[in-house]
Amino acid sequence: MSLRLGDTAPNFTARTTLGEINFYDYLGDSWGVLFSHPADFTPVCTTELGKTALLNGEFAKRNVKVLALSVDPLDKHQSWIGDINETQNCEVTFPIIADEDKTVANLYGMIHPNASETFTVRSLFIIGPDKKVKLTITYPASTGRNFLEVLRVIDSLQLTAQYSVATPADWKDGEDVIVTAAVPTADIPERFPKGHKIIKPYLRTTPQPNK
């Protein structure tokens, strides 16, 4: 199964390091990040989960709940968390799903047979409070993800869900944004009272409206 943007994220019940959870109940009205890693006790995965734990406060500020997943069993997850905390100077407090039967991995298309027939690749899904898939990123097993980019994307998704704006290349929270084509130029002063620039008729910018 291949999930596309705008699809409803499949619900599931799974065993995790924090007990059994129902995905929708766990998310509630929050945004969600669900990401898979190929295997426990591997170096790149150790750094990824450690980085996620260190950014826990940043995810919380954005009303985002995180879940990790691999097809390894629960006892390995529990043991591995000790290594992650020790080597990455963090405390893993988010749940790690033990998807031994690959139920969740198959629901979300996390196993790419041409890369590995048994292990999940580095899939990441950002899911909105409406349970729709807002973003997908897939990395090979050999490349660790940039979780600051994940936070940047969440900032953009949450901003553009509220206002008729888009974010330009390399945009960071606090920088100017683009007024979408759906807003007539004549309406910009009323919609965006902080001011605007007309660079081209199709390229209009304004200060970030929620700052």
Image (cartoon, helix red, strand yellow):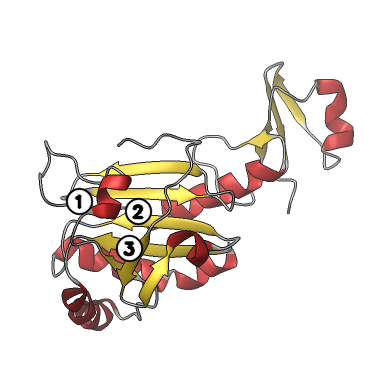
Q: Amino acid at mark 3?
A: Ala
Tell me whether circle 2 and circle 3 mark residues in contact (CB < 8 Å). Answer: no
Where is residue 165? Give x, y as percent. Answer: 68, 35
Where's residue 26, x and y in %?
49, 66
Q: Quadrant of the C terminus?
A: bottom right
Query: Which residue is at a point 38% across and 64% down the rendered structure image?
Result: 67
The crowding category of the residue bearing disc 2, from other C-alpha atoms within 10 Å (few below 14, some 14 to 19, many at least 20), is: few
Q: Which residue position holds label 2?
A: 146
First-in-chain label (2 vs 3): 3
Name the disc covering residue 120, or none. Answer: 1
> Mark 2 and 1 residues: CB-CB less than 8 Å, in contact?
no
* Residue 51 located left or right of residue 173: left
- In front: mark 2 or mark 1? 1
Rounded to the nearest angstrom, the CA distance separating label 2 from label 1 is 18 Å
Instruction: Name the kind of residue labelled 1 in the image.
Output: Thr
Residue at point 21%, 48% (across, down):
121
The image quadrant of residue 195 is top right
Q: Amino acid at mark 2?
A: Asn
Q: Earlier in the sequence, mark 3 or mark 1?
A: 3
- Residue 12, by quadrant, is bottom left
Of the 4 image quadrants, the one containing the N terminus is top left
> Camera-side residue: 31 or 142?
31
Measure how far apart labels 3 and 1 are at the Cα level. Answer: 11 Å
Residue 87's place in the image compared with 48, above or below, is below
Mark 3, residue position: 68
The answer to whether residue 80 is left or right of residue 30 is left
